[in-house]
Image (tube, grey):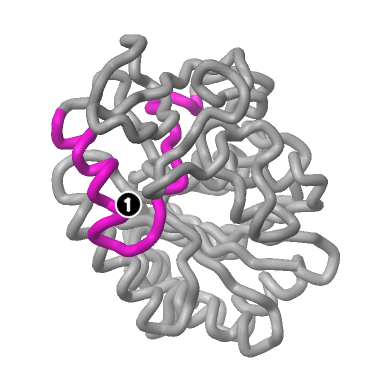
Amino acid sequence: MTVYFVTGTDTGVGKTIVTAALAVILRAFGQNVAVIKPVQTGVRPGEPGDIDEVRRLAGPVDVREGTRLPDPLAPDRAALVAGVELPGLHDQRDLVLDAATSHDAVIVEGAGGIIVNLGKAFGLLDIARAVREAGQPARWIVVARAGLGTLNHSSLTVWAIQNRGFSVQGIVIGSWPADPGPAELYNRDDLSLYTGVPVLGAVPGGASALLPSDFRARAPDWIRAHWAAPSDSADGPTGPRAGPAGYLNPAGGSHGCGGGCFAQYLNRPDGAPGLCLPGAEQAGRDL
């Protein structure tokens, strides 16, 4: 059993859609998955929240929401405005531990960035520490932007997590544009150099508009799945295999996606294989 903590370099970077894709990948490995959102802000009672979107896209996963607050603010401020006291650290830890008792994997989606408070002077890092101290493995996946600023934001986020003694499995670009410019393309290559952790893949912009069945069929092609495999050496069920220098090699098909997706296998001019990223529309495009 492993608890995966999903954080973003900022708000609105695609954490929820990436969380749904991660749940799809874990389910493809036969794992029973729970997804937890300790604090949801900006959603009123009766409105669909982030966990509802995860369940809609990922299918039959157990989803659990902690506290819901109506104002689109950081959780501690939203609670103050609403006159609500957020649950304490142990209560939020137990929300995760309770799910861990009956599931093979638990995904915990944070709110905003890594240092945002989810309670009185504690955040997602503190919940992860408490979960780890209770004996459950805790790993991290960082969701980042593709454009300018992402190298700095991603490096600081990874550093903050590693500084607390955690392992970061990698970075997922939360919304890859259909027509990426030079900044996006260079950032994709440079993220691993700056942060020291691999880029696991990218989710195409607008992926939430796909039919849920299409989302589930394509999600394993967007994100490298070795982190979810039963052993470190295992590859994803349909995704590409790890290649030299942290890039991805095709694992069967012309671009390694198993067919039926809208990713494009991109080659670099130095001959090294590129990432199988969604959204590129020109075949054989050199980076």
Image mark count:
1
The residue singled out by tag 1 in the image is 11
Q: In terms of depth relative to the viewer, which is nearer, 9 or 217?
A: 217
Q: Could you tell me which secondary element the residue under label 1 belongs to?
A: loop
Q: Nearer the viewer, residue 178 or 75?
A: 178
Residue located 62% across and 80% down the image: 131
Q: Position of residue 42 (x, y in %)?
A: 41, 50
Q: Judge left or right: residue 188 versus residue 36.
A: left
Quadrant of the rendering where the N terminus is positioned: bottom right
Instruction: Note whether 117 is above or below 203 in the view shown.
Output: below
Residue 103: say if magenta. no
Residue placed most toward the observer, 244 or 179 = 244
Name the amino acid, label 1.
Thr
Residue beneath the point at 31% across and 57% down: 9
Give the percent coordinates (x, y) of residue 228: 66, 53
User: In the rendered view, would you say 134 is above or below 27?
Assistant: below
Residue range of the region highlighted in magenta in the rendering: 182-208
Image quarter of residue 282:
top left
- Please report the residue visible at 66 percent of the width from the left and 31 percent of the height from the top: 238
Q: In this rendering, is residue 216 above or below 230? A: above
The answer to whether residue 71 shows anywhere in this view is: yes
Query: Which residue is painted at 28% across and 29% down in the image?
Result: 268
Q: Residue furthest top?
A: 282
> Where is residue 194, by image quadrant?
bottom left
Where residue 263 sits in the image (x, y, percent)? 46, 21
Label 1 environment density (alpha carbons within 10 Å; few <14, some 14–19, many ≥20): some
Which of the 4 image quadrants contains residue 36?
bottom right
Rendered view: 117 above or below 104? below
Q: Quadrant of the C terminus?
A: top left
